[in-house]
Image: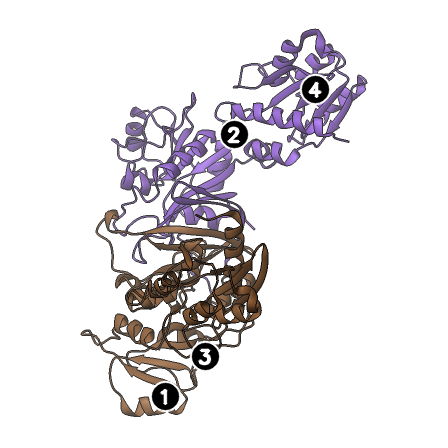
Chain colours: A purple, B brown
Amino acid sequence: MFTPDDQRHMARALELAARGLYTTTPNPRVGCVIVNGAKVVGEGWHEKAGAAHAEPIALQAAGAKAAGATVYVTLEPCAHFGRTPPCVDALLAAKPARVVAAMADPNPQTAGEGFARLRAAGIAVDVGLMAAEAHALNIGFVSRMTRGTPWVRMKVAASLDGRTALAGGQSQWITGAGARRDGHAWRARACAVLTGVGTVKEDNPQLTVRDVATTRQPLRVVVDSRLQTPLDARVLGPGTIIAAAGVDAPRSVALRAHGAEVVVLPNHEGKVELPALLQELARRGCNEVHVEAGHKLNGSLLEEGLVDELLIYLAPCILGDTAQGMFHLPPLANLQERRNLRITDITRVGDDVRILARPG
Amino acid sequence: MFTPDDQRHMARALELAARGLYTTTPNPRVGCVIVNGAKVVGEGWHEKAGAAHAEPIALQAAGAKAAGATVYVTLEPCAHFGRTPPCVDALLAAKPARVVAAMADPNPQTAGEGFARLRAAGIAVDVGLMAAEAHALNIGFVSRMTRGTPWVRMKVAASLDGRTALAGGQSQWITGAGARRDGHAWRARACAVLTGVGTVKEDNPQLTVRDVATTRQPLRVVVDSRLQTPLDARVLGPGTIIAAAGVDAPRSVALRAHGAEVVVLPNHEGKVELPALLQELARRGCNEVHVEAGHKLNGSLLEEGLVDELLIYLAPCILGDTAQGMFHLPPLANLQERRNLRITDITRVGDDVRILARPG
């Protein structure tokens, strides 16, 4: 069904889509290439919510040459009115001969509607070319559309013996500059950076993206059951959410006065209900949540089955077994109880090693 | 100085040398290729101590064709009488035109003597082709010759969060069958497999090479300061050394009756003097020592600066921070005190990741 030329053009469309990696949220990253004969007559990519979608941009570039052409698009063209008109209408008006899409709209309630309208107009529609790559690019959007929760990626920076901080808390810096920059690139594509109040008190992080260029900062979210975030914490400011387990009016007022929003999501143990927090973030349009926390919150998220991906940087050093571990978890009675993972990627980043893994 | 043909023949000589990986100890692994014109006229490799060296085997195969030929050898030909006559004498008798050696004899007291005698006889001698590969092949032999101690390689099998056993001690098996087989290949090339009495009591290991074919078993060495090795431990038998810190005649007699040798090497803290143990092993001809121990002995060896290489297998699973760590070390006051490593290799072995690292 797909030719090497199809592959090449879709690869280009994915490359264009990836330009929106840091900016499209809550929208998906989408790229579009229009080819008439052997010639590329239009290209487009979606930059950010409210701005034009990839298809209209490419169609405008192609002009009359879109008629009879093949349109490569990384995601099913939208068939509904959002902040912009439906892309399907623009395609129908341009009369291409064929539309090749990497994947269908992940929203099960609307998936296929775009394709159906194109096919009804006599346009050939082929779906599934480089679907894995397209899915990976929008893994958070797919997660939010299909599960109602963001894709949760947990970053851990540790020594080769799995230690994330000294017993006294010092952790800056275990990994090298290259790994930290790489970590900021992962932050930049996330919609929210999540941490715990322990890390706020210990490291006083800003949780902003600094080491890579971006026009958008993710939300900053602090799990802080008892509202212990210091009022001079660098994380406070507009775009910061403090997730608490109980109401403490004076503390809440003070934190709000420092720019933060306080949301109260208690569970039956008097802590923050983590699944509810993730659902709340999804409700606000968060596709990918980037966790940078200490071993306690890391352990809680793992134990509740809320982690979709681990992003582990291992530095070439040893800290020894009095230093802090990665994940605070209850003791296992036997090895069969271990949490299995599937390693999806191993890359050297500077002197460090980056391992991507998912619950297996 | 070296041509692509030289490279090719030396690569072959190294390949031949590697056939002796499990058997030559205490001798080095050596390979030899003799080329006359464009034709390989003889090949040889050293199999084990007492058997012929690589050069005489290759010379015998070459016969009269060795005259005027080029001899490729991975190590400087010996110039002294050992269990066999000097290889230099055999070379001088065969009258090759040129000898290409990867590296000099690592023993500083005799290095260069073989080359000098060849050159004195008018034979061209070129040294240093693929020296790094040749050095790596005999890293333990070089260590013993130049430092008087074996090359100490410490194997650690851990979860991705750096845990080697559950709190209760269970560790079989964290890594998969492929990693365990790979570990046995590293055992097989070692002259001794070293562990602590804690591991003997916990896991009751045999410490033998089983998963790969070999005609030689390494020595088994147990660091057991207070002679607590159970008399029914599977590690006991001929070829086992129990290193103790004090004399306990009845225990020693009992352990000897079970086939083990007891050596007493106390330090001032009433434990085994680990540097002295390594020197003793070198004195017995141990080139490479393979450590498979628990976090306590691992930590002691590291702390005393006795570890030359780490062989770490990380399994795709999480055990959590109540499980045992890799290295029991004193707490660090700050991150500058960390032990830095240099990662030399990362390879996937089955579902696991193998990382080789050296103190940096």
Quarter-of-image position of residue B100? bottom left
Answer with mark 3 or mark 1, whichever residue precedes in sequence. 3
Residue located at (21% from left, 51% from top) = B333
* Chain of the residue under the numbered disc 2 shown in the image: A
Relative depth, front residue between B314 and B39: B39
Same chain for the residues under marks 3 and 2 in the image: no
Farthest residue in the left direction?
A: B268
Q: Residue at x 48, y 26 (%)?
A: A22
Disc 4 and disc 3: Cα gap in Å? 75 Å
Number of residues whose C-alpha sits closer than 10 Å to that of mark 2, classed few (under 14), some (14–19) or many (20 or more) = some
Question: Is mark 2 in CB contact (under 8 Å) with mark 1?
Answer: no
Secondary structure beneath disc 2?
A: helix
Which residue is label 1 attached to?
B255
Report which residue position mark 2 lands on.
A283
Judged by depth in the image, the label closer to the viewer, 4 or 3, is 3
Q: Nearer the viewer, mark 3 or mark 1?
A: 3
Name the residue carrying label 4. A71
Label 3 sits on residue = B50
Query: Residue type at mark 2?
Result: Arg
Q: Residues within 10 Å of mark 1 (few under 14, many from 20)?
A: many
Chain of the residue on which disc 3 is drawn:
B
Q: Is residue B294 visible?
A: yes
The secondary element bearing badge 3 is classed as loop
* Dots 4, 3 in contact, CB < 8 A: no
Residue A156's x, y, as percent? 40, 44
| Separation (CA) of disc 4 from disc 1 | 80 Å
Which amino acid type is marked by label 3?
Gly
Determine the secondary structure under disc 1. Answer: helix
The label nearer to you, 2 versus 4, is: 4
- The amino acid sitting under disc 1 is Leu
Mark number, residue A54: none
Q: Give SS at disc 4.
A: strand
